[in-house]
Image (spheres, rainbow, N blue to C red):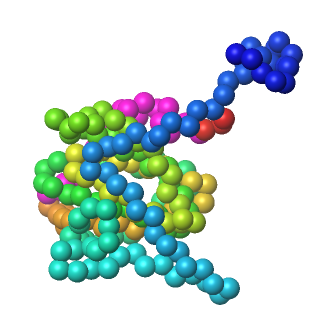
Amino acid sequence: MSHRIELAPEYVSVLEFERYPAAPQIEGVWVHVLKKNRSENGAFMEYGRLGEDGMQGLPGPLVPRQISVSWAAPGRINAFHIHVKEEQNEIWCVISGQLTVWLVDCRAGSSTLGTKRKLVLSGEQPTMVHIPSGVAHGYQAGEAGATLLYTMDAQFNMTDPNEGRIPWNHFGEGLWAEDRG
């Protein structure tokens, strides 16, 4: 490989270039950026509009049955959850702080089986992420922690939770390693 700028040999031997491939897609996962309207004294954001068929104006359908809030302490890893007893699709949206989110398609017969996708969700630019049943999901909170607003099309059942767990490091501890590049 030729370069217009000549480097000393000790630097050429360790030189690598960044690559920016498209994010891997997982069947049924969609992302929807919300509009945060700012003014000199604050901001306003519409999370969702509800109609006869559930939430309106989204890339895919979801009829809310429960809306919850989770607060994550700084650096907290909360992974991996999966919903398989019954259908339970979710929409996640970080409203403050930051979460590094990993999704892994575990659905037998899925065209994207085994695909891993990383997203960074932040209260600076709130974005909805749809997580279908059978897609393992987990997060690591940023240094300021995070507040996660999530909407589900099923209600939590305390006597028979639909909250399957896969160990946090099952897909590799490297998923949670800090990007130092």
Residue closest to the eye, 2 or 38: 2
Residue closest to the eye, 2 or 79: 2
Asked which quadrant contains residue 20, the reply is top right
Horizontal side, residue 175 vs residue 179: left or right: left
Q: Is residue 31 at least partly visible in the picture?
A: yes
Q: Is residue 70 at least partly visible in the picture?
A: no
What residue is at 34 percent from the left and 35 percent from the top?
A: 115
Q: Position of residue 86 (x, y in %)?
A: 13, 54
Q: Position of residue 90 (x, y in %)?
A: 28, 60
Q: Position of residue 151 (x, y in %)?
A: 30, 67
Horizontal side, residue 165 vs residue 36: left or right: left
Relative to 157, residue 117 above or below? above
Magenta residues span 160-178
Relative to 130, residue 114 above or below? above
Q: Position of residue 88 (x, y in %)?
A: 20, 57
Q: Is residue 29 magenta?
A: no
Secondary structure predominantly adopted by residues drawn in magenta: loop
Horizontal side, residue 41 vs residue 73: left or right: right
What residue is at 55 percent from the left and 50 percent from the top?
A: 75
Relative to 141, residue 152 above or below? below
What residue is at 36 percent from the left and 32 percent from the top?
A: 170
Q: How many marks?
A: 0
Asked which quadrant contains residue 107, the reply is top left
Q: Is residue 161 magenta?
A: yes
Relative to 44, residue 21 above or below? above
Say which quadrant the N terminus sits in: top right
What residue is at 27 percent from the left and 61 percent from the top?
A: 60
Say which quadrant the C terminus sits in: top right
Horizontal side, residue 142 vs residue 160: left or right: right
Q: Residue furthest bottom?
A: 41
